[in-house]
Image: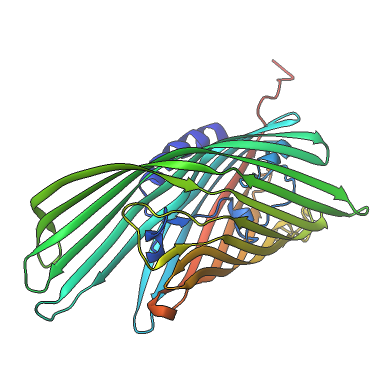
Amino acid sequence: MIKKIIISACLLLSLVSIAQEGTSSPYSFYGIGDIRFKGTLENRSMAGVAVEQDSIHINLENPASFSSLKRTTFSMGGTYGTKTLKTNTESANARRTTLDYLAVGLPLGKFGLGFGLIPYSSVGYRIQKLSSEVGETNKRLSGTGGLNKVFLGIGYKITPNFSIGADANYNFGKIETNSLEIITNVPLGTRELNSAELSGVNFNIGTMYQAKLSKKLSLYSSLNYTIEGSLTSKNTRNISTVVYNSTFDLSVVDSYGEQKTQSDVRYPSKISFGMGIGESKKWLIGGKIAYQKTYGQENTYNKASNVGYGRFGSVSLGGYYIPNYNSFSSYTKRIVYRAGLKYEKTGLMINSESINDMGLTLGFGLPITGSFSNVNLGFELGKKGTTNANLIQENYANFSVGFSLNDKWFEKRKFN
């Protein structure tokens, strides 16, 4: 059954992840868009903390974790998000539903194999400045698309407590931006349409280590490094004169031809380190710090004199608690309760203001009776950006659902 689910879900996510609008943030105009969380809902509910060598859950951040899997694991998750965008004078609401990841992990003795598809970044915004005064210039800006990541990784358990791993990622996607300028009461306008087709390969390496501190307590650690790479961007720009109606349906009157260029977008290196302490299958508390040289690079269509890209940094604290994982009398005692706090300096600077993100996460792991599989629910509340310097603050709330399904593969039959 799990094989049929995997095949069906792979086909579904492959189609949807390429086309979906995964964000409603005006800040996704910059760089290659909003960088998505790379991990499962189980880790996201702990603010990204993923230090334990889990045998039935996939850790997408560190490929060394694949060697700890004991069962074939299929994991998939999606999010429904609401967002309030506010300035000093106005506010607006937006909603999005997205698929977040699809991954499969295979245990192969001391080795473990993982592969899947993850949306890496998303572009999605609609901004307009309209005036009823005659002769005023009005603008409508929109953008869609993003970058997706197909990965294949392998982990190896050198000792029962120490694992190493590496994965290769093929990144691909398309970003489209549309800029329309019109003058009040003039039925003609100018439209600039840009598209960027992105592709490139990068690599990720990691290690995980755990040690017994006492009969019950264990120390966990995780170190992960993303090697610097680059993305090839094939850019197309088209400027045309358009006619529009009251609903802004456009018809091209005259086109000034296409301009094609090619550029390289830097894929920066990133290092993250996590450490935690806890009792296996009972509780864990840990933290994670991450550092990246630069947030991203501008492309030909999103250069701006008031925008800069600095260093990325994040700090997370999170953990889980299970009252009694093998309780037969109480289902609620087998539920995994998760929580976390995060603070992220995105590295994006606009009008000399740093765009930062902070949030609170909560989650529940609901075991499926009679199996090692579970359904996960997650909640996230946070704030990104600021209203200073005429910028936009985003207050967001996300509700996520994830599935972690486990099965035994490659097992010899005892009876024919």
Count all numbered tags in the image, as a single digit.
0
Which residue is nearer to you in this view: 195 or 413?
Answer: 195
> Visible in this render: residue 72?
no
**Percent of width and height locating residue 210:** 82, 47
Q: What residue appears at the point 48 percent right and 57 percent down from the top-left corner?
A: 79
- Quarter that holds the N terminus: top right
Q: Is residue 253 above or below residue 390?
A: above
Identify which residue, 162 or 352, lies in the foreground.
352
Q: Quadrant of residue 80?
A: bottom left
Q: How is the image coloured?
A: rainbow
User: Image height check: is 200 above or below 250?
Assistant: above
Q: Is residue 64 visible?
A: yes
Instruction: Tell me which residue sits at (64%, 46%) in the image.
Output: 225
Q: Residue furthest top?
A: 416
Most extreme residue toward the bottom is 89
Left or right: where does residue 23 sit relative to residue 5? left
Q: Position of residue 69 (x, y in %)?
A: 71, 38
Question: Viewed as shown, does residue 343 lie left or right of 156?
Answer: left
**Which one is nearer the viewer's eye here, 305 or 70?**
305
Residue at the (60%, 36%) spot, across then down: 167
Q: Residue furthest right?
A: 215
Quadrant of the frame with the C terminus? top right
Q: Residue 259 appears in which quarter of the rendering?
A: top left
Q: Position of residue 25 (x, y in %)?
A: 40, 64
Relative side of 307 to 71, left or right: left
Question: Which x, y percent locates residue 248?
Answer: 15, 63
Q: What residue do we see at 51% from left, 37% from top?
A: 5
